[in-house]
Image (cartoon, rainbow, N blue to C red):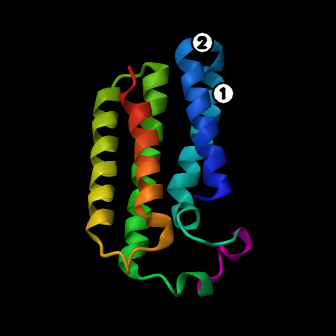
């Protein structure tokens, strides 16, 4: 996991837990959720690879990646951003929270199953079982908390 992702996930989880116990922290959670959801949705290929920020828009960075890996990364980013939107709906008590939570959990499970079905020598380091399980645990715990 990159330092950017660790920073976003830790503050997202901390603000989520604080917003569960006090209404004062809901605004802070929404800010981190918008930031984290946007990062996962738009920058999933950057967050889930070994790219530096200055190599983000260079085509030479993406030449080593195969098409299936990029699709899996984009699906991963979409699943994680859907989970973050479901958390915002949950904290703000909007209708449709249950549907979003189910969709997010199903997408995360699909990405995890696809990732684990790949052979180890084709799987990049960012999608290793350890980091993938850590992300799945963090998002699943936040989604399944009452």
Which quadrant: the N terminus?
bottom right
Residue 6 x, y percent position in the rendering: 62, 49
Q: What residue appears at the point 28 percent right and 33 percent down from the top-left corner?
A: 99
Tell me which corner region of the image, top left, top right, bottom left or bottom right, holds residue 82: top left
- Magenta-tinted stretch: 53-59
Q: What residue is pinned by disc 2? A: 22
Left or right of residue 27: residue 92? left
Q: What residue is pinned by disc 1? A: 28
Does the residue at mark 1 contact the one at mark 2 (Cβ under 8 Å)?
A: no
Residue 48 x, y percent position in the rendering: 53, 64
Residue 87 x, y percent position in the rendering: 45, 32
Q: What residue appears at the point 32 percent right and 56 percent down from the top-left corner?
A: 112
Q: What residue appears at the point 60 percent right and 82 percent down from the top-left corner?
A: 61
Does dot 1 land on a helix, a strand or a loop?
Answer: helix
Q: Earlier in the sequence, mark 1 or mark 2?
A: 2
Vertical side of 132 occupied by 22: above or below: above
Does dot 2 land on a helix, a strand or a loop?
Answer: loop
Residue 96 visible here: no
Residue 84 x, y percent position in the rendering: 47, 39
Left or right of residue 65: residue 12? right
Distance from the alpha carbon under mark 1 to that under mark 2: 11 Å
Q: How many marks?
A: 2
Assess whether residue 24 is covered by the magenta stretch.
Answer: no
Tell me which corner region of the image, top left, top right, bottom left or bottom right, holds residue 47: bottom right
Q: Check residue 138 in the rendering and tell me which mark sits there, or answer none.
A: none
**Crowding near pointer 1: few (<14 within 10 Å), some, many (20+)?**
some
Nearer the observer: mark 1 or 2; the answer is 2
Q: What residue appears at the point 44 percent right and 65 percent down from the top-left corner?
A: 127
């Amino acid at each position: 996991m990159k330092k950017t992702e660790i920073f976003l996930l830790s503050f997202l989880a901390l603000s989520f837990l604080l917003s569960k116990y006090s209404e004062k922290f809901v605004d802070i959670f929404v800010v981190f959720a918008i930031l984290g959801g946007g990062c996962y949705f738009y920058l999933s290929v950057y967050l889930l690879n070994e790219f530096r920020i200055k190599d983000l828009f260079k085509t030479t960075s993406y030449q080593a990646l195969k098409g299936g890996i990029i699709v899996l990364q984009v699906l991963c980013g979409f699943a994680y951003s859907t989970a973050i939107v479901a958390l915002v709906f949950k904290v703000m008590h909007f209708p449709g929270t249950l549907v979003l939570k189910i969709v997010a959990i199903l997408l995360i499970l699909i990405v995890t199953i696809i990732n684990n079905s790949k052979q180890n020598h084709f799987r990049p380091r960012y999608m290793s079982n350890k980091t993938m399980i850590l992300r799945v645990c963090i998002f699943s715990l936040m989604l399944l908390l009452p």
